[in-house]
Image (cartoon, helix red, strand yellow):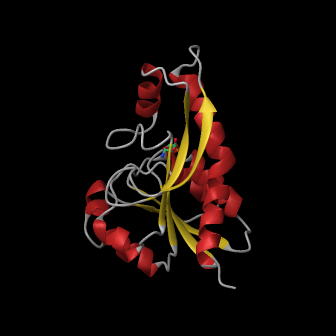
Amino acid sequence: MTKIRVAIFASGTGSNAVNLIRFFKNHDSFEVAFVLSNKADAPVLESSQNLGIPTISCSNREVGEAGFLTNICRAENIDWIVLAGYLRLIPTDLIEAFSNKIINLHPALLPKYGGKGMHGRNVHQAVIANRETESGITVHFVNEEFDSGRIIAQFHCSLDENDTIESLEVKISYLEQSYFPVVVQTTLLNQRHE
Ligand code: GRF
């Protein structure tokens, strides 16, 4: 059977992109076709290359242009796009071309703590400032607005008054590393069999 071709988009460190690449390495059903970043100096590019995955570096202007990302993904015969710390809005034409085939990982329990500017430490800072007793991660489909597509799965962690932005970051990273690749795998395989 032909493998499902996955593109990963990432803007930063890439701990989740690397985790996905490792998880899908030598997988029977999937292959990571490339990692694309809108930041030429994003560490995710080098980490991915070190794992033998081709990378594509683009400017913010390019990734916002209608047709640009869609053309790349079509040319590479991509089936699914996974956003792993990708910080740009996805253009409408790409969402239409890959309807319900783009997945994002968010480091909080959506619909709380989502939307423009809610990424990375900003999220954890807001969660701690509001003295939440829990946080977690959300895996969801991507639509035209930041963090508002249909939720696929959520995983929780508890917080107490001693938690800091740093300790919350550790808890969230643990959940992401433990669950994200498995949720991606299940979602993609379920759709293949629908
Ligand atoms: C992760 O916390 C993810 O939930 C969010 O961006 C962060 C990316 O981290 N979307 P990394 O680049 O994968 O280390």
Left or right of residue 180: residue 164 = left
- Classify residue 114 as left or right of residue 46: left
Q: Does residue 12 sit above or below 182 in this rendering?
A: above
Which residue is at 55% across, 69% downward? 6
Query: Residue 98 at x, y = what percent?
Result: 42, 73
Q: Position of residue 30 (x, y in %)?
A: 65, 71
Q: Can residue 41 be seen in this snapshot? A: yes
Q: Is residue 148 left or right of residue 131?
A: left
Q: Name the residue nearer the viewer: 34 or 16.
A: 16
Residue drawn at the location 51% of the way across and 40% of the way down:
107
Quadrant of the drawing holding the C terminus: bottom right
Quadrant where the N terminus is found in the figure:
bottom right
Q: Is residue 33 above or below residue 123?
A: below
Q: Position of residue 51 (x, y in %)?
A: 65, 58
Q: Nearer the viewer, residue 101 or 75?
A: 101
Closest to the observer, 35 or 70: 70
At 62% from the left and 52% from the top, the residue drawn is 180
Quadrant of res 160? top right
**Residue situated furthest top in the rendering:** 162
